[in-house]
Structures are given as structure tokens and as C-alpha cells.
Image (spheres, rainbow, N blue to C red):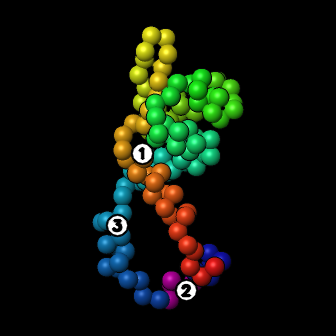
């Protein structure tokens, strides 16, 4: 299939202004990689459920583990990843760490995704 496309492009005129506009407006490779990392993190159902729970209230690892019905270790691992890419933050109260969403952008990302999957499909 790729060969057929290359052949077709070799004999057709390339729209140089469109290629140049795309080069000027599309994000850099580095930013694209960071954005892909964000969406990859959101691509796991358990991580999404963690974020949805934290969108409602701050919670500790023990409560999140009980909510997901998984080990505290598994939750801690997921929270570490989410914290690394700045989707969640924590605060310490004595010996307990409480987690919350990093900011409203995280809430908006999830809300937009939910709106998209809940809208009626056209042509189906």
C-alpha cells in the first residue's frame, strides 16, 4: 500500500503551501511525545478510574486500593506514574499521603473525553 501511495505522490503535484502550513502549525516532536505520554497514561482503565475518583475528592492510597479492589502497591505504582506526568499531587497529613488532581485541566480532559464517548454516533 505504501508503494502505491509513493507512486501516486510522485506523479501528482504536492500542495507545498499546505505542507508548509502544517510544518508551521503542528507541535514539535518533543511536545508531541509529551502529549502522547499524557494520553498513554489516560489510556489505562484503572488509572482513569483513579483520576475520576480523585476528581470528586482527595483520597489516600488505602481508600483508592479499596475502591479499585487492588493492592496498595498497585495503586502506589499508578499514582507514582500519574504524579510523574503531573496529573496528580499529594499532601502529607501525619503518616498518610492524600492524593488529588493536579489542576482543573485534568478534570477538563476527562470531562471532554466523556462528552465525546457519550455523544450520539453519526452514520452508525
Dot 3: element: helix
Q: Report if residue 75 is visible in the image.
A: no
Quarter of the image that includes the N terminus:
bottom right
Of the two numbered discs 3 and 1 in the rendering, the one whose residue sits closer to the viewer: 1
In the displayed structure, does residue 89 sit left or right of residue 74?
Answer: left
Residue 39 located left or right of residue 105: right
First in residue order: circle 3 vs circle 1 = 3
Q: CA distance from mark 1 to mark 2?
A: 43 Å
Sooner in the amino-acid sequence: mark 1 or mark 2: 2
State which tag comes first along the sequence, 3 or 2.
2
Q: Which residue is mark 2?
A: 8
Q: With respect to residue 24, does 121 lie above or below?
A: below
Q: Nearer the viewer, residue 40 or 63?
A: 63
Residue 65 placed where, x, y %?
A: 63, 28
Q: Nearer the viewer, residue 30 or 67?
A: 67
Q: Where's the C terminus, which quadrant?
A: bottom right
Q: Position of residue 100 (x, y in %)?
A: 44, 32
Decide which of 106, 27 is in the foreground and name it: 106
- Please tell me whether mark 1 or mark 2 is closer to you in this view: 1
Residue named by callout 3: 23
Q: Give the answer, above or below, for where 77 lies relative to 48.
A: above
Q: Which residues are magenta?
A: 6-11
Density class for disc 3 (Cα within 10 Å; few <14, some 14-19, many ≥20) is: few
SS at badge 1: helix
Whether tag 1 and tag 2 are in contact, CB under 8 A, the answer is no
Is 8 magenta? The answer is yes
Instruction: Find disc 1 in the rendering and name its residue.
Output: 106
Amino acid at each position: 500500500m505504501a508503494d502505491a501511495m509513493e507512486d501516486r505522490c510522485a506523479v501528482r503535484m504536492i500542495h507545498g503551501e499546505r505542507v508548509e502550513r502544517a510544518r508551521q502549525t503542528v507541535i514539535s516532536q518533543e511536545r508531541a511525545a509529551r502529549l502522547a505520554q499524557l494520553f498513554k497514561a489516560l489510556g489505562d482503565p484503572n488509572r482513569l478510574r483513579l483520576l475520576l475518583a480523585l476528581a470528586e475528592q482527595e483520597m489516600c492510597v488505602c481508600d483508592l486500593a479499596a475502591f479499585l479492589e487492588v493492592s496498595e502497591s498497585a495503586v502506589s505504582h499508578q499514582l507514582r506514574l500519574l504524579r510523574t506526568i503531573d496529573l496528580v499531587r499529594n499532601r502529607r497529613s501525619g503518616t498518610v499521603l492524600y492524593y488529588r488532581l493536579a489542576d482543573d485541566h485534568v478534570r477538563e480532559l476527562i470531562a471532554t473525553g466523556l462528552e465525546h464517548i457519550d455523544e450520539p454516533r453519526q452514520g452508525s
